């Protein structure tokens, strides 16, 4: 069984890598074509190629569920055409024994996808988007597009910009009372975070509102302590797709703690987890199809079925995730529904194999 497992794993992994390479080549071509539409004097063909290259790990993570299904269909289909699967069945191996062997390939692909989706894809995707912004608009455009709002308990902060030195430029602070009434408005011409995570506000001016009237307080240097740190600010300015799983979890906790909606980030997190888990199911689904409806089909027909099922899963999962945000549905249930549906189809199909 160990020899057969290694043989099946090697076959499926080889065809999956070939399929993934083809899909990435096509996706990279479309990425470059799309970027060339925005090309100008500062952002040309070389920058577009670099942007597409940096996006490849993230695209590979997103395409692995489809690639694992198509690769498994191609690999197992080749074994079926050579009657190797029939020989394995004749030697006494049951369908479920073959399914367990095929599932080992899914485990390997799932682990690889989890590592790429957590440590490689998101940071390179963020770097690619930042590089494109700097190339298209320069530092001035980067600063003007980096303004952000954050909430820390009863205080709402509006920062003009953020750079790698954690200097934020001008900042507005809006403080609210226990009854959600506006207690004060403050403005600092420059702000930043020191090594102790203290907020340093320069040329600080605060207007305080009370029942007795309005009071204005001025200071050349003010020190504030907020739970919002530089890491959290960096996360707040990044698209969900460019965040790691740890970043998503941390930011979701921050949003819930401050009574802010976290549905967008929860949807991204659960969609990512469910998509990664789907990779484990795809090779077993391919085995069910090879023994069932596609037993006598050619390689082209198997790949076409893989494309249709993969695209159907991708579109269904994306549509459900977006619909969940629109209709305020539970993101875990919405994201896991396509994966559970595929699992049920796989189990039913394997049970019907004789």
Image (tube, helix red, strand yellow):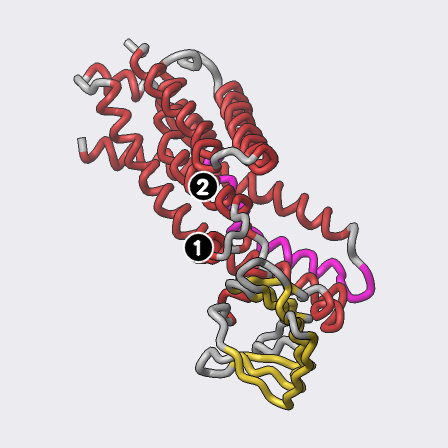
Q: How many numbered circles does the render carry? A: 2
Residue annotated with mark 1 = 253
Residue annotated with mark 2 = 270
At numbered mark 1, what does the secondary structure look like: helix, strand or loop?
Answer: helix
**Which label number is shown at residue 97?**
none
Residue at 40% across, 18% down: 289
The answer to which image quadrant residue 154 occupies is bottom right
Does residue 168 appear in the picture of this structure? yes
Q: Which residues are magenta?
A: 40-67
**Image position of 18 with respect to 320: above or below:** below
* Percent coordinates x, y for residue 214 in the rendering: 70, 76
**Residue closest to the far bottom:** 220
The answer to which image quadrant residue 270 occupies is top left
Please check the rendered image and state whether residue 60 is part of the magenta-colored stretch, yes or no. yes
Residue at 42% across, 24% down: 342
At numbered mark 2, what does the secondary structure look like: helix, strand or loop?
Answer: helix
Q: Nearer the viewer, residue 77 or 161?
A: 161
Residue at 70% across, 61% down: 46
**Image position of 226 with respect to 77: above or below:** below
Q: Main secondary structure of the magenta part?
A: helix
Mark found first going from the N terminus, 1 or 2: 1
Image quadrant containing the N terminus:
top left
**Residue closest to the far right:** 41
* Percent coordinates x, y for residue 339 in the rendering: 42, 29
Q: Is residue 91 left or right of residue 84?
A: left
Residue at 21% across, 18% down: 94
Q: Nearer the viewer, mark 1 or mark 2?
A: 1
The answer to which image quadrant residue 8 occupies is top left
**Image position of 247 with respect to 30: above or below:** below
Q: Residues within 10 Å of mark 1 (few under 14, many from 20)?
A: some
* Percent coordinates x, y for residue 100 in the rendering: 25, 29
């Amino acid at each position: 069984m160990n020899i057969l497992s290694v043989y099946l794993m090697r076959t499926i992994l080889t065809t999956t890598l070939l399929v993934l390479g083809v899909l990435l080549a096509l996706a990279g071509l479309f990425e470059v074509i799309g970027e060339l539409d925005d090309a100008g004097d500062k952002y040309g063909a070389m920058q577009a190629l670099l942007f597409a290259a940096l996006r490849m790990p993230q695209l590979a993570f997103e395409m692995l569920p489809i690639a694992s299904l198509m690769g498994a269909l191609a690999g197992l289909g080749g074994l079926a055409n050579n009657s190797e699967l029939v020989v394995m069945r004749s030697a006494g191996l049951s369908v479920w024994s073959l399914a367990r062997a095929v599932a080992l390939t899914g485990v390997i692909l799932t682990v690889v996808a989890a590592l790429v989706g957590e440590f490689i894809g998101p940071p390179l995707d963020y770097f690619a988007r930042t590089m494109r912004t700097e190339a298209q608009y320069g530092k001035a455009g980067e600063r003007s597009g980096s303004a952000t709002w954050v909430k820390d308990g009863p205080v709402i902060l509006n920062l003009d910009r953020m750079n790698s030195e954690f200097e934020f430029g001008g900042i507005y602070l809006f403080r609210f009372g226990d009854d959600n009434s506006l207690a004060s408005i403050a403005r600092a011409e420059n702000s930043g975070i020191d090594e102790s995570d203290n907020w340093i506000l320069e040329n600080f001016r605060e207007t305080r509102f009370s029942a007795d009237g309005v009071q204005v307080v001025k200071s050349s240097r003010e020190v504030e302590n907020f739970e919002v740190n530089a890491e959290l600010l960096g996360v707040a300015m990044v698209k969900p797709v460019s965040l790691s799983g740890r970043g998503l979890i941390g930011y979701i906790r921050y949003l819930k703690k401050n009574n802010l909606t976290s549905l967008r980030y929860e949807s991204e997190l659960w969609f990512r987890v469910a998509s990664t888990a789907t990779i484990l199911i795809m090779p077993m689904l391919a085995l069910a199809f090879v023994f069932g409806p596609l037993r006598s089909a050619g390689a082209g027909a198997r790949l076409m079925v893989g494309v249709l099922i993969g695209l159907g899963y991708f579109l269904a999962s994306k549509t459900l995730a977006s619909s969940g945000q629109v209709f305020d549905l539970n993101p875990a249930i919405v994201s896991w529904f396509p994966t559970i549906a595929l699992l049920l189809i796989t189990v039913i199909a394997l049970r019907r194999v004789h």
